[in-house]
Image (cartoon, rainbow, N blue to C red):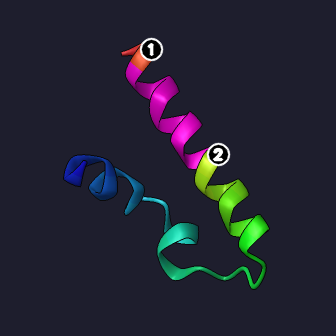
Amino acid sequence: VERTFAWLGNFRRLVVRYERLITTYAGFFHLACVILTLRRVLK
């Protein structure tokens, strides 16, 4: 779990949180998870 949070820390938009709406932030969070998963699968 801690490793996943560290990987998500590489996404500046999630760390800084520019979005005001939680739905927008959740969308970027899900997109980051998809990118991380794809990187892991393609590796």
Indicate left or right for 3 with 23 as reference. Answer: left
Q: Image quadrant of residue 40? A: top left
Q: Position of residue 2 (x, y in %)?
A: 21, 54
- Disc 1 or 2, which lies upstream in sequence? 2
Question: Magenta includes 35?
Answer: yes
Identity of the amino acid at label 2? Leu
Identity of the amino acid at label 1? Leu
Q: Which mark, by number, is residue 3?
A: none
Indicate left or right for 43 with 6 as reference. Answer: right
Q: Position of residue 38 (x, y in %)?
A: 51, 24
Pointer 2 local density, CA inside 10 Å: few below 14, some 14–19, many at least 20 = few
What predominant SS class does the magenta segment belong to? helix
Indicate left or right for 18 with 42 as reference. Answer: right
Which residue lies at the image location 52% right of the left edge and 81% below the top edge?
16
Q: Which mark, by number, is residue 42?
A: 1
The boundaries of the magenta stretch are 31-40
Q: Position of residue 13 (x, y in %)?
A: 58, 70
